[in-house]
Amino acid sequence: MLFQIGHTLALPKNQLRIRVIEFYRWDPSPHEVIRIEYDPNRSSHLALLRNTINETYSYVIAPYNLQPGTIRSSHANLLCIVPILISVAIIRSFRQSPNSESVQTLQDFEITKLYL
């Protein structure tokens, strides 16, 4: 007998389960939270999300008040809006005369600092 059955094909009982986390969610479709899991590799909780349109699953780092069954969506559209807000703030600041400092230009510069 060349080998014993059970010893050659035996797998370890405690396999390391590595979860790939999706840090950048580019899909703006709604996702349903299936469950919250603890990840010992990161010492944090992860949320398993299911895409409601194409039924794909992904892991994200779970925020504090996230509960199973809630519907979440990513803000990928915000990346298209932010450059427009910055350009509008810069145009408004150049339209005003350099001698008069108004509250509106200060607010515009605060918006640019916020999004940069």
Image: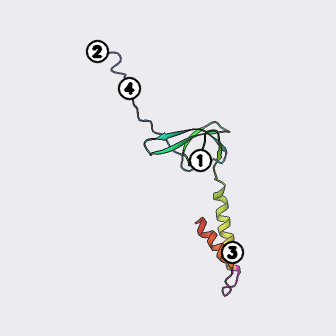
Q: Amino acid at mark 1?
A: Asn
Q: Amino acid at mark 4?
A: Leu
Sequence-wise, the earlier of marks 4 and 1 is 4
The percent coordinates of residue 94 (x first, y second) are: 67, 79
The percent coordinates of residue 11 (x first, y second) are: 38, 26
For the residues marked 3 and 1, what is the alpha-carbon distance in whole angstroms? Answer: 40 Å
For the residues marked 4 and 3, what is the alpha-carbon distance in whole angstroms? Answer: 64 Å
Tag 3 near tag 1, CB within 8 Å: no
Q: Amino acid at mark 3?
A: Ile
The percent coordinates of residue 16 (x first, y second) are: 41, 35
Secondary element at image label 4: loop
> Would you name the residue on which mark 3 appears?
91
The answer to which image quadrant residue 41 occupies is top left
Give neighbour class at mark 1: few <14, some 14-19, many 20+ (Cα, 10 Å).
Answer: few
Sequence-wise, the earlier of marks 3 and 1 is 1
Sequence-wise, the earlier of marks 4 and 2 is 2
For the residues marked 2 and 1, what is the alpha-carbon distance in whole angstroms? Answer: 57 Å
Tag 4 near tag 2, CB within 8 Å: no
For the residues marked 4 and 1, what is the alpha-carbon distance in whole angstroms? Answer: 38 Å
Which residue is at 67% across, 66% downward?
A: 85
Sequence-wise, the earlier of marks 2 and 3 is 2
Residue sitting nearer the eye, 9 or 40: 40
> Would you name the residue on which mark 4 appears?
11
Residue 97, placed above or below residue 72:
below
Q: Which residues are magenta?
A: 95-102
The percent coordinates of residue 39 (x first, y second) are: 47, 41
Give neighbour class at mark 3: few <14, some 14-19, many 20+ (Cα, 10 Å).
Answer: few
Secondary element at image label 1: loop
Name the image quarter holding the C terminus.
bottom right
**Mark number, residue 2:** 2
> Would you name the residue on which mark 1 appears?
65
